[in-house]
Image (cartoon, helix red, strand yellow):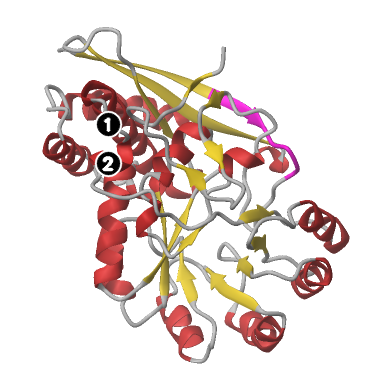
Amino acid sequence: MSLRLSHEVLRLTLRDPFLIARSDHDAGHAVATVVIELRDDRFPGLVGLGEGYPDRFYGETAETMAAVFPLLVTSVEGFEPTRDGVRAASDRVQNTIRWNGGAKCAIDTAIHDLAGKVVGEPVYRLLGLSTDIPPTDFTLGLDQPAIVAERAKRASAFPALKIKVGGPADLATLEAVRSVYDRPIRVDANTGWTPEVAASLLASLVDLGVELIEQPFPAGRLDWLADLQAGSPLPIVADESCVTIEDLDALVGVTAGVNVKLAKCGGPGAAARMLARAHELGFRTFLGCMEETSVAIAASAATASLADWVDLDGNLLLADDPFSGLVLGDDHRWQLSEAPGLGVERRS
């Protein structure tokens, strides 16, 4: 074998406590993500960086990722570092094993980064995409309304805020944010509402100028999602109900939008294909992330020209990002580097 992989579990402190309706990581103070380095004996001196976020909601841990890495590495052995070759290798990653999106994401990202470094092209160009991407919003976790409003003030330069809801003070929180912030607000309940709660809040959300509602109900309740979308002037966006490209067809006529995340679907190659297919089916597309380093955010940003809305702030939520090279412009768009691969590197 010419491919060699090493991986590291990074335990990262968050800048502010970050809780969601189904939060399960260290009371919202820290997260764990898995970063890999992929080396190929054919290309000495070059290292492909990858990252995958092990989300227990989807059955992944750092241990399950480590267990499947050897199988996934074998699937891309001898890949050609060309656009077609990387596409074929990315497909093999997705088809080798079911689920395991975080592990696939790490491998898929690393082969794109390595191939870009071999041929001297940035990842977005390997994907056949452009640098014309939407600005990112900034996400605020569940907390007391006054605390969320104070954080909204601090983030007021962002062109949109995503507010985590699904707690007892949702309306009070959104009213507090609106009192200090006059731009678009997006709400994300992370499966935390019931139809009754959604119905009681909908008119107020419209009055408050909310732009969209993300995953209000449990993942399997497509019937509830369809009923809410049918009566809602706001787009409903499926997140936990939309994990991979295989989930898209079942959501046609159910929600107006879908949230694509590399850690769910399996990396930048998989995300680009999923975003393109979602547009073909008539969905509006939301490109999201987890609390990840600049490795995963750079890989996500490479696909962002296919998104209508962008929520790529995971590295901004960290107290200390271990990687450098990804730059956020004054317009809050990630600046896609012309450097080969992802354009990021480990801080010394």
- For disc 2, the neighbor class at 10 Å (few under 14, some 14 to 19, many from 20) is some
Q: Mark 1 Cα within 10 Å, few/some/many (few <14, many 20+)?
A: many
Q: Quadrant of the N terminus?
A: top left
Q: Residue 232: where, in percent of width, then height?
A: 53, 88
Question: Is 170 left, or right, of 286 in this rendering?
Answer: right
297, 225: nearer the viewer: 297
Say above or below: 48 vs 202: above
How far separated are the C-alphas under marks 1 and 2?
7 Å
Please give left or right for residue 348 compared with residue 338 in the image.
right
Q: Residue furthest right?
A: 146
Question: Residue 231, labelled with which disc?
Answer: none
Residue type pointed to by label 1: Glu
Amino acid at pointer 2 = Arg
Q: Considering only vertical position in the picture, is 187 above or below 104?
A: below
Q: Position of residue 345 (x, y in %)?
A: 47, 21
The reply to whether the C-beta atoms of the residues labelled 1 and 2 are less than 8 Å apart is yes
Please check the rendered image and state whether residue 271 is part of the magenta-colored stretch, yes or no.
no
Residue behind mark 2:
125
Q: Which residues are magenta?
A: 10-17
Residue at the (41%, 77%) spot, across then down? 255
Residue 263 seen from this side: no
181 vs 37: above or below: below
The structure residue drawn at horizontal position 58% and vertical position 51%, both measured from the top left corner, is 332
Query: Where residue 115 sits: x, y (%)?
Result: 24, 27
Residue behind mark 1: 121
